Structure formats: structure tokens, C-alpha cells
Image: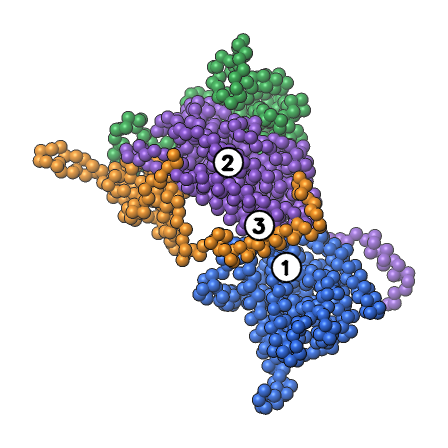
Chain colours: A blue, B purple, C orange, D green
Amino acid sequence: MPGWVTDLFSNFWVSLGGKLLLVALMIPLVGMIIGFAEMKLSAKMQSRVGPYFAGGRWGWAQLIADGVKFFQKEDLIPADADRPVFKTAPILVLVGTVALFVVIPFGPNLIFRDLDVGVFYALAISSLSTIGILMAGWSSANKYSLMGGLRAAGQLIAYELPLVLAVVGSVILAGTMSLQGIVEAQIEAGYPFVVIQFVGFGIFMIAALAELSRIPFDMPIAESELVMGYLTEYSGFRFLFFFLAEFANMFTLSAIAATLFLGGYWLPGVPEDVLEFAGPIILITKVFLLVFAMIWFRWTFPRFREDQLQRIAWVWLVPLALLNIVVTALLKVIL
Amino acid sequence: MTLDSETIRHLSEASVSVELQTEDMTLNIGPQHPSTHGVLRLVARVDGERCFDVHPVIGYMHRGYEKLSEVRTYPQITTIVNRIDWVSGYCNEIPFIVAAEKLMGLEVPERAQYIRLILTEMQRIASHLVFMASYPLELGAATPLFFALRERERVLDLLESVTGGRFHPNFNRIGGVKPAYASGSTTRKLPQDLPAGFLQDSRDAMDKVREAADELEDLVAGNEIILARTKGVGVLPPEVAVAYGVSGPNLRASGVAFDLRKTENYLPYDRFDFDVVTAENGDCWDRWYVRLQEIRESVKIVQQAIDSIPSGDLQAKVPKVIKVPKGETYVRAENPKGEMGYYLVSDGGQGPYRLKIRSASFSNISILRWILEGILVPDIIAVMGSLDFVLGDVDR
Amino acid sequence: MTANGSRRSLPGGGMLKGLGVTLSTMFKTIFRPKKYLATVNYPKVKETPVPRARGVIALDQEACTVCMLCARSCPDWCIYIEGHKEEIPPAEPGGRIKVRSKLDRFDIDYALCMYCGICVEVCPFDALFWSPEYEYSESKMGNMLHDMDRLQDWLLTVPEPPALEK
Amino acid sequence: MTSSPSDTETQESEGQGSEPQETEVHPLQGFADRVAAAVGGSAEIQFDTVKVIVGAEAWVAAHQTARDDLDLVFFSWLSAIDWSKEVAAGDPLGEEVEERIELLSALSNVTDGDLVILSTTLPSQDPTVPTLVEVYAGADWHEREAYEMFGINFEGHPNLIHLYLPDSFIGNPLRKSYPLLSREVKPWPGTVDVEGMPSANGSDEPTTENPEA
């Protein structure tokens, strides 16, 4: 690294600006890549071709075209909508997603801010988007979005608990809440925590699916019942915020799952110094594996009714997570 | 104010005894809604997710067929009649044509009857495949839609190769079947028959449809989430079904083995062996499963019909301007949606004096008010989807 | 699996089978598209319609004797015909002057037409034919009214009657 | 006209269409007589369709016995025919017929699919008949349709409002006296006439008058 660059970055404000710029660039990029992957993979799963014409041979520019389309769409706000709430709802949802990027360790020292309460911060921030969704549901002055918003509130809060409890297992094993610390604990323990924490990993993935309200936990945006749930009245770039937030959220939650359970930017055989450069690539492949699983689930399963959904959360996931914590704690004490 | 133990106890009891005052919201599952199969409007009184009573409003698609048919000639009616239940276009024409032929005392040649039977069963497969596509979509699974529609393309291509049309074949004439060629001096002498290779293509298509049925069964039938969403939902007891006149797969799913193909003689069904599929408890899952089995039965019928199709000409001797002698008759047939019948009153003119069209979906959804009492909103969509109705059939 | 397919061996069995189906379809479509890909990319790759497909009605003006049968029997009243009578000079001098009716206007309004084929069937002079052509959509509905010459051009696309089953 | 059961009891196959003047007994004759006797009406068989004519006052009772004693539990449909001389749309009747509304209802059993059509005659000025909703729950919508299309008043019907037509619609469309409005707006394209069809092929001359006027 040339000299003037390091002391340029050492100045706090410039590095903050750079990091913000980087995150602001990553969100649309990641959202588009995952969105495009979903379109193409779902098409293949249904023996179709998928987007083909945008951008020449195999339609890579489809999502850029979508983005432009959404931007030039008329930004409609329903007449008797609650205007301020209607306008800030998408921003809140996007902030909930962007804030998650801060704690994800892409490499040994490639992290925006290594908080020592990393995990706690991540889960708290991700529940911010729940408020955004509820605001969207309430403010659209449309019966269907109101029902969608209330369903989202019930679902996201019900699945917040298993999400948090599932994480406690690997926090006990690592002994620290900072994500960087958890990855180092896995490096030094020699195996990714999923080997012991497979129950926690399963619960975390199911709860993550519910947080994203993706099929099979699709009640808030149940296309066949509530037209588009809380998104019914949104159009133009506000819908784009929700659209990107969903895909970016898929990335961040999978990144956190990979960091907590699959050993983040580390692979068992990789030596220390190579991690400096190979780290982000390893993490991104793990994330794409998890994202592929989410896409795969989405195009195979129908959706639960919300009373079944709540029963799964309260009757199955929460007790299972508690049991997992007890067992991990016992193992930690005995070993 | 500090909460002493007295008020706390009172509050806890109060919250138990006080019934939460919520007035219910009238939700318009309106004429324009993703899963009402057309322009049906349900005015539902909903408290939270539970809906108290549902008042279906129909008539948005009423085209007045019965009045139209009083000013049409018989060939013109066969072309508008297949637009009643547009998902199974070909099957709508059969009872009307058989009724007219019965009044005229016409003997339809064997080959024409076999071709009619093959095309009816193919149309039944296509109609059930549309159900196989749209019902899982209502429950949220998008992939079965593409599997079912991909197979339906095969069947529709076969239909188009014979009749020229995919949805509205217009291949039936009074007295037999005939492709739409001009009747001038040269084209009249052209021999008219099935296109070359049709029988072989149908055999291959039927094998592929059978494979697709198994694939759909793997993808949808065993899926625990679908079982959770459909088992025991929207149970229709046989006596209520029969009182409302529900017919077809919905009735057979409630355990009543009543199939018009076995009792009526509008087409030579008695020459083929197929069994009437029934199920026990008449819930959404059984209605789905009865239709899947019926696809397999239809495949069996088509294969038997193809192997034993006689040769011969396609149409009986019919005058150019058709006048049906005076008389009244009611002919009913097993449409993919249920019993479709025509009460034809003719007065010897070029068109009928009165034509009563009994369509299956009209009675099938007259039970909506009874069956949708007090269930959750997502179940309304699941139950309505399982009845498999088409709004053209309801509103005529 | 039981008669109505409820219970499986293990509780998640049904879902795993479903996942298996989607995954295998994905690999089949990616690696053997010719066999499993169901859709084509329309403007570049076009599927040819079957010869008997009823795409558009073609008119042979010479054969038409303006007998108005098609216009009368059309359920949608979407055929508008006008013609006049014309004397044709006899072939050799002194022969009889033949009176023949000529078409002035023969429009089919495809916005109204329901492709039922009654006009083609009822024409006693082989003037109307079906052609499987389907790419004539218009931006304005007014252009759906095809006039005489356009119907004449469709005549070139009318296929030979297909070979028949034995 | 009741087809008198002649003495020769030859059983012919169910499927064979038969004219009423056949000497053999129609296979459905037994069924028709049984229904007529139970319901107290006269049976007639026309082109394989059993029709039992019942008095208007015994309408509900007939359905009650049909459902309970004769196991005709399947309520297929209910509709009406407006027999009248002057006809606003479509070709008029051949010979004289007395002005009346014939109410029809089709019932069948779910075992071997025998179907009977009960029919009764009502005056064409404000026809009224008691409702069948207590006997067959399915009659609810059919009666509403007959009410709005023919103007038949069904006493005791839970909510006798329009089914298909908007509430503000006046008139009963399926009555013969109701004209088809769309026909007045657009002239029939067949009226432009150049020359009569040369009757070369011998089949009757296609009349220049509109077969659908």
C-alpha cells in the first residue's frame, strides 16, 4: 500500500466516507446479482429460459433494466395514505439491511467495524425492518396491505426469538459476541461450529427465511391472497427499495449464518496468510450456497397458513433452540 | 398512581372477562383479484383473519347465452357454445350437438363418435392440467404451474393439429365432425380425416402426460405443507353437495360415485373400461387428488380409443341449411367441471325456440356461501381454488 | 403411499421428494436443453404452426361471386361486402354477353372475428381459405379491418391440405 | 300427450333414441310412470327425456315426495320457458300456443342417473309459485335467476334479488317480448344484396331475409 494512501485512510472521516460509499455501492450490486440469480435459477427449475434479451446473449442486464424501469415509474402515493409514514417506511427497511453490512467480516482485517457486541447488534438492527414493514402496511390505507402488515408483524416478531436463541449456541462455543472473534474461535478450534451446532444452524436458516418473509413463510406478501401484501400500494423507486432490501437482506443474513456456523472467511485447509486475499471469495461462495438453498426452497414449497406458521415458531423452534443452548452449555462445561 | 396489588389483580381479571370490542371489516375479495378464477366478487365480513359470512356476487361475465341462442342458427350456436367453459372448449359442444342430432334422429358414423370421444378426453386432460397448474399456485408453490402447463401444450398441439383451434376447436358439426374447409366444387371432394401421424403422436403424448402426472404427484402430493394447508379444509359432505347440485370431481371427492360417462350414452363410453375415481372425506386435498387420478383415467381411455378406432367417413348426410324438427329434449354430459346439460326446445326453425344451458360451475359455487362460513382468509382462497370453477361457466 | 397419498416414510419425505424434482429439472434444463427446455425465445426462434391452424382467412377474389352467404352466416357480423354487376364481352363475336358480379369491397374486421370458420365453410365457390399465419397484430384497432387486397395477399400463405391418416 | 304403454313388452337397449310413436315401451317408461304416480302428475317421454307435468299448487309437495320417496336427491337445475305468440327476437312459433310460462325443474338420482323434469304452467302475467329452498338448498340461485329473467315471484325465498343483472336493470330479458337491443344499433351486414344466389346446387335458396332477425 503506497504511503499517502495509508495516512489518507487513517484520517477518520475519509475512511468513514469511503466505507459508506462502499456499502452504498454493495447494496444494489449484491441485490442485482442475487435477483438475477433468482430469475435465472427459478427459470431453469421450471424448464424455462429465463430473462434473455436485456444485455445481449443471456440477459445479464435484466435487473439494471428493471432498476431503470422502477425509477422512471410514476411514484404513486394513495390519496388518503399516511404520507410521512408511507415515505419513510422503505427507507427504514433499507437502513435495517445496510446497517447489517457493518459487522460482517469479509477477511481477517477486512471488516467495516469490529464491534465486540457484533452478534447482538446484528440481530437488533435486523428487527428494525420489521417496524418499516408494519409502517408500510398501516400507511397504505388499503385493507389488503393492512392485513399484510399485521401478518408481517406477527410473523417477524414470532421468528425473532428463535433467530436470537439459535445464535446463542455458537456464541457460547466462541466465548465472544464479536463476529471476528467467532471466526477466529472457529479457526483455532479447527472445525466450523456447524459440526456441533447443526440444530442451531437449521433453526437459524428457518428463522432467517421467516425474517425475509420468503416462501414457505410468505404470508405478508401472499400474492394469491393479499394481492401483494404490504407492497400493494408501492410503485416506482419506493418499491425498488423494498425489492433491493429483500435481496440484500438475503445476502446479509446468509453472510451472518456463514460467519456464525460455517466458519466465515476461513476454510479448514487454508493457511493464515492466504486468507488475506482468499477470505472474501470463500465467504461469498458460502453465501451463494445458502442463497441458492433459499431460492431452491422458494420455487418448491407452498406457503404456510399463519396459524401453522406461529405454531411452528412457538411450539417447535423456540423449545428446540433452548434445548440446543442447554446441550451446548453442558458440552462446553464438560469438555 | 402506584399500582397496588388490588388493582393489578383486578386488571388481570378484567382483561380476562372483558371481550375485546372489534368491529368486523367488510373485505371485498373483489371482481379483480388474483385467485377468483375470473370476475367473481366475494363480499366477506372479516374479523381479523376469520371471515364470518361470504356473499358471492356474480354476473360480471353474464353474456346472455340463452337469449343469444334464440336468434342464432344451429351451426352458429355450436361456435358460441364452446365459449361457456373456455378451459374445456370442446366438451361444451358435445351435449348440444347430441341433443340436436337426437331431435333430428341422425345416426352419427362410428369414426366420428370415436374422434369426438378422443378429443373430449384430451380436453378433459387439458382442463384438469390447468387445475393442476393453478391450485398449487394459490397455495404458493409456483413450479407445478410450469410442469402442468408444459404438458398441457402437448395436448393442445394435438387438438390444434386436428381441429385447427386450441381453445375453441369448432370441429363439431350436427351429424359428425368436419375440419373447416370451404364447400366449393373442388374442396368438397377433398377427403377429410385426421391428419397423418395423429394417432401415433397421441400415443407418445399420452405416455408423457402419464409421466407428468407422476412428477406432479411427487412435487405436490407428498408435500407436508400442502397436506397441512388442504387436509380437512373445506369439507363438503355428500348430502349438502347433492342438494346444491354440485357435480363432477367435487361430488366424487365427497364419496358419491356418480359419473355421467357411465350412466348417459351421449358418446360410446361403454366400450372402454375406466373406473370412477372417488375419495372419502371431500376436503380440498381429495378434490385435488381425484382430479389427478382422473387425468390418469382419461389417458387410459384415450389409449384404448386410439387402438380401436374404426375407419369410415366423418359426417352423416346433412342438408346445407339445418332445420331441427319440433320437439324438446335434455341431454347432459360429464364436463371436466361437472354435469353440463342443454334443454333444447326447437320449433322446426333454423334456430332453437328456447335453450336452457345447465353449466357445472354455476351449481359448484352456489355452495360457496355455505362452505366459506367462519374460515380463515387463506382458506377461502384454498377452498375456492379446489372447487375449480370458471366464471364463464358460472355466468353464462 | 396410501390411497390418498397422505403419510410418507419420514415426515420431511414429501418435501425432500419435491426438492429432488425441482433440482433434477434444473440440471436437465441446463445440460440438455434440446430435450427438456419447453420455451423458445420468440423473435429469434419461431415455432411453426400446424397446417390446419386457423390463423387468418385468405380471400381468392376471382372465385368470389358476391353471393353474400358468408356475410349473412357470420355470427359476429364482421364481414362487410359490396359488389356490382358487370357485363363481360363474349369470347367470340356474337356470343352471349355474360353478366358477372365483381367485388368492390370485402372487409373482414379481425377485431370482431372469433375465428369460428363458418364463413369459410359456407362459401360455395371456394373463395375463402384458412391460413396458419398469426403475426398480424396491430397497434391501432382500426387496422385490424383487413381489406380485399390484404386478404388476397394471405392467399400465398395457405398451405396444401395435409396428408391424412390411413 | 302420454305415450300409452302398448302390450308388447320388448326391452330395447337404453342407448337407442326412439320416437314417441314407437310401439315398444320406452325403457324409461317404468321410471316415468313410477314418478308420475308418486307425484300425482302425468308423465310423457319425448326423445329419451322424462317430463312429468304437475299442478302449480302441488309444486313443493311434488319435490318433497320426489326427494324423499323416489331418492331423486340431485337437484340439477330449475328454469322456465316463455311460450308466447309474438316474439321480439328470433323466429316466431309455428302454430297457435296459449300464452303461459312453463316452469321446469330437473331432478336426478346419483345411482343410475335417471333424470326427471317436473314441469308446471304459470300464468304469464305476474307468475307466482312457492319456493323450493327448504326442499333443495341448491334452488336458491336458480330461483333468483328465474326471478330476474322471467319475472316469476317465488314466495318465501330468503333473498329474492337479482343474480346476474345489476340491481338497476328493468325488464325480464328472457321473456319473448324483450327485444335484443344490440340488433337495433348495428345494421345487419347481410342486407347489402347484389344478386340472388344462383340456385345451381339445388339445395334450397338461402333466403335473403336474416335467419337471425
Q: Identify the residue under disc 1.
A: A214
Q: In the rendered structure, the residue with mark 2 lies on which chain?
A: B
Q: Quarter-wise, where is residue B386 in the image? A: top right
Residue B12 in the image: above or below residue B348:
below
C-alpha separation, residue under disc 1 versus residue under disc 3: 18 Å
The amino acid type found where label 1 is placed reads Arg
Residue positioned 48% across, 52% down in the render: C35
Say which element carries label 2: helix
Q: Identify the residue under disc 3.
A: B144
Q: Are marks 1 and 3 on the same chain?
A: no
Q: Residues within 10 Å of mark 2 (few under 14, many from 20)?
A: some
Question: Taking the image as drawn, is residue A121 in sight?
Answer: no
- Percent coordinates x, y for residue A228 in the rendering: 59, 57
C-alpha separation, residue under disc 1 versus residue under disc 2: 43 Å
Q: Identify the residue under disc 2.
A: B303
- Percent coordinates x, y for residue D95 in the rendering: 42, 21
Outermost residue toward the top? Answer: D7
Q: Quarter-wise, where is residue D123 in the image? A: top right
Q: Are marks 3 and 2 on the same chain?
A: yes
Question: Mark 1, mark 2: which one is toward the viewer?
Answer: 2
- Of the 4 image quadrants, the one containing the N terminus of chain B is bottom right
Residue positioned 49% across, 21% down in the render: D16
Q: Nearer the viewer, residue A120 or C99?
A: A120
Question: Mark 3, mark 2: which one is toward the viewer?
Answer: 2
Q: Quarter-wise, where is residue A26 in the image? A: bottom right
Say which element carries label 1: loop
Q: In the rendered structure, the residue with mark 3 lies on which chain?
A: B
Residue positioned 45% across, 39% down in the render: B200
Say which element carries label 3: helix
Residue A313 in the image: above or below residue B245:
below
